[in-house]
Image (tube, rainbow, N blue to C red):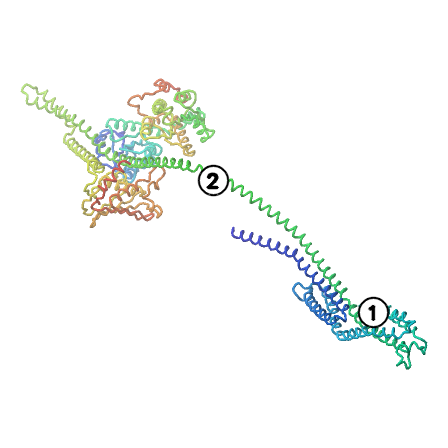
Amino acid sequence: MDDVAPAKARVLFVDDEPRVLTTMRMLFRSRYEVFFAESGQAALDLLKTQPVDVIVSDQRMPGMTGIEMLRAARDLNPNAMRILLTGYSDLNAIIGSINEGEIFRFVNKPWMNDDLSTTVARAVAAAKASMAAAAAAAPASTENADSASVQPGADAAGVLVMDDDPRVPPQIQTILGPTFKVYGATSMNEAVEQLEKNQIGVVISDTRVQDHPVVSLIGTLKQHHPELVSVILTDRADAGSAIELINQGQIYRFITKPIHDSQCKIAVNSAVRQHQRLAASPVLQQRYEVEAPAVPPPVAAGGTGLLDRVKSLRSWVRRLGS
Amino acid sequence: MKKLRQVFFALLAVAAIGVLVFLLRMTQSVDADLHRSRLERIQVVGNLDVLLNRQFTGSRVSSLADSVTDRSGTTGQLDTALNALDKDVGALRGLTPEIDKALDAFLDTIESKFELAFDSEARNTLLTQRLINSMDAVPTYADAVTTAATDAQREEVRNLTMQVKTEIVNFGVTPTPPAAAAGNIRALLEQLQAMAPPTPPPAPVAEGEPQFEPEDPPFTKAVKGLRDRSEEVIADKTELVAKLRDFLDRPTGAQLQALEQAYMAWHESQVAVANQYRTYLAAYAAALLLVLAFLGFRLARSFREIDRANADLSHANEHLEEQVTARTKDLSTALQDLRASQAQLVQSEKMASLGTMVAGVAHEINTPLGYARSNTEIVRNSLDDLRGLITAQDKALTLMTSQNASDEEVAGALGEAEGLRATLNPAETMEDLGNLLKDTDFGLVQIADLVSSLKDFSRVDRSRTDLFDINSGIDSALKIANNLLKTRIEVVRQFGELPQVECSPSQLNQVFLNLFTNAAQAIEGEGKIYIHTTAETDGVVVRILDTGCGMTEEVRARIFEPFFTTKAVGKGTGLGLSIVFRIIEEHGGRIDVRSTVGKGSEFVVRLPLKQKRHSGDTAGSAAPELAAA
């Protein structure tokens, strides 16, 4: 088992409960090169000397929380995929993990071994891909520049705002300023129409539109158009839907109403840059791969037809890129 | 300020009244009564002067004594009247220099008159007496003349003597006889003289008184006598009249008039001044009236306002009853609402603590549950592998012992079993499995512990008043609160030997959990909580010390008030410590706080060993209320 290929992925597990680490060792030692840390600080110390592909961390630990550790880890080792494995987390922790930790998945304790294995495997694949992209970044820069020149300024990509409240899109437009094109939609149908008609790079959405959860739409969008970046803007945040949105929709940012101008602007700017990166480097999109919902969620008011439309959306980015 | 204004207005009013009084006095300076009495006094003096003159002139011989008496009486009266004019109250003196001068002149004159009267009193009396005597003598002498006359002439002589007598009487009696009267008398006497016979009067003379007519005839002698008497009368009378004239000529009347005029002039001027002041007074009164009118207007206005206010007030009074009823209803509704919302708040506080607890407990349970479940799955999978190995080994063994098995079969089976054994490394796997199961056991025990703690904590299966070990209560509360504490807070326990305390365990657990939660929230970052328990003679003492942020004296004084919270809106109901306070109070205990900002806080809970029994069970009585809340 020691004579494994050098390509064997490195996975770091962080938990203050050593028995969890034992279990992880039993589960993953055959597939990956596994590392363990019993606290956030120990994990960071390890990361300084040992780059890893995936970090799986508990949230509640003495001294340093999982999110704090993951945020620091993002700076130390930006290519590593981050997974939060926790028994219970309040909403603030989840929002923090999305916005600050930019985590790949959120896994609840107790976990299913198969699911955890799949998630870790996906994370490993994404990490490999992004590592390759990063390696290719330098030589491929001219190529990227070419594609960027074909597409006149990625910031030309519009921002779609989905909200029940028709006042929100103009408000966002005011906050972002005239360099952004903001499209509004008060229903999912409208949103799909807008997506069909316009170049959209960033979707800002409430968690529910017309009383339907948007997670399936966002998830489908991400599945088929991974270059789209989603930002959730809501005043009825709850932990469950946030976890769904991160796991199934790979939402990029989660901000709560009332809207703070600067916070909103920073989030959207960051989302647009993210979109540009993704559009330029499709291989990176794996990092933001979503998991297909186990059971296709029943989508009312549009049903699967709507999702089909989403699947068949013209991918102008690809078209332009090809 | 207001007082100053009042004083100012009072002074103003006093000044206004003062001016009014002054003006009134000035207009009243002409005293009509005094004026009249003064005029009367002048008149009295004038009358008395005239009377005196009359008495002086009208004195008769016949009533000489009377007239003197009368005169002295009049003089007395005049003296009094003069005094009244000169010196008494309301006298004229001192009014003006002119009046004084006139008065002085008059007084001097009248004084001189008095002196004159006094001086000539004796002489007058003498003269008058003599006059009377002479007059009385005249008829005798006249008769003598008549007698001496001749018969022929007797009638004529009688006439003449008669005339002389009449003239003399008239002359003597008339106070101031005409100047011609003396001449008349003398002419008559001359006529008589002329009627005398020639030098030697004839016999007829002898007829009369022939005995003595040595040189003069008796007629001539008689005429001469008459003439002498008459001359006496004339001389006396003339002297008297001269004296009288002298007396009467003293210009008392004119001077009195001058005095009166001077006085009148003064009076006129006084009246003029008074009139002037009257004009001023009228103007001033008009001005005052204007001010009064203004004040009255203002007063009327404020009265109107007061009236309106009164009307409003009475209106309000009329409606007070219904308002009170309405308000009472509102208040009772509000009270009900308040009670409801308080109950709701207490409930939400419980839910919030429950939420915190559940969050912690969920994590505490999910972690061991996670690895336990994962481990069982691994064990199951490994067991499958082991089963395969065992099956292979079994098969190889069976084949080896079998009579009819070929060597190839045996070798094949053995090789397969060996291959499986090599991959599985059963010794290591068995050890791993043992370890996994040990971990799983450990996790399950942890979960069981936690569940038992929860059960202990809620004590739903125990009676409300129970003998309870406070130390174990603190332990179970710490276990519940562990998720809050373990990541950053070190708990230092110093438990003493404690007797069991009669109490409601679930409530006390709530108290401890609350205090630990607060302590943990007070600690920013890492810190320590010291828990110290000691037994005292009649109870137990629990000290909970944290190294948190502490609190100010103002906060410390209020922390047990319901709804007081230093946490952000929505983060705490502010009921936690008030519930703690109530529970401890209802257990007959005490809770004290000491705190230093920046250093930490210490909560000291004292609980008695036994509950007081009054009107049933005390702890029990509190419990339903809290349970219901």
In front here: B235 or A14?
B235
Depicted A82 relative to depicted A314: above or below: below
In front here: A170 or A35?
A170
| Chain of residue at mark 2 | B
Secondary structure beneath dot 2 equals helix
Q: Is residue B135 left or right of residue B550?
A: right
Q: Is residue A237 left or right of residue A172?
A: left
**Which disc, if any, is residue B255?**
none
User: Residue B88, how many percent across, how many down?
Assistant: 66, 65
The residue positioned farthest toward the bottom in the image shown: B214
Mark positioned earlier in the residue sequence (1 or 2): 1
| Circle nearer the viewer, 1 or 2 | 1
| Chain of residue at mark 1 | B
**Are there few (<14), some (14-19), or many (20+) residues within 10 Å of tag 1?**
many
**Which disc, if any, is residue B313?**
2
The residue positioned farthest toward the top in the image shown: A305
Secondary structure beneath dot 1 equals helix
Q: Quadrant of residue A49?
A: top left
Q: Report the amino acid beneath label 1.
A: Phe
**Mark 1 and mark 2: span between their CA atoms?**
106 Å
User: Residue B326, how many percent across, how many down?
Assistant: 40, 35
> Where does label 1 land, which residue?
B171
User: Residue A169, how many percent across, how many down?
Assistant: 43, 27
**Are there few (<14), some (14-19), or many (20+) residues within 10 Å of tag 2?**
some
Q: Is residue B360 left or right of residue B163?
A: left
Residue at 44%, 36% (x, y): give it: B319
Q: Quadrant of residue B459?
A: top left
Q: Quadrant of residue B36?
A: bottom right
Q: Report the amino acid beneath label 2.
A: Leu
Split into 4 quadrants, where in the image is the C terminus of chain B?
A: top left
User: Residue B293, how many percent across, how many down?
Assistant: 60, 46
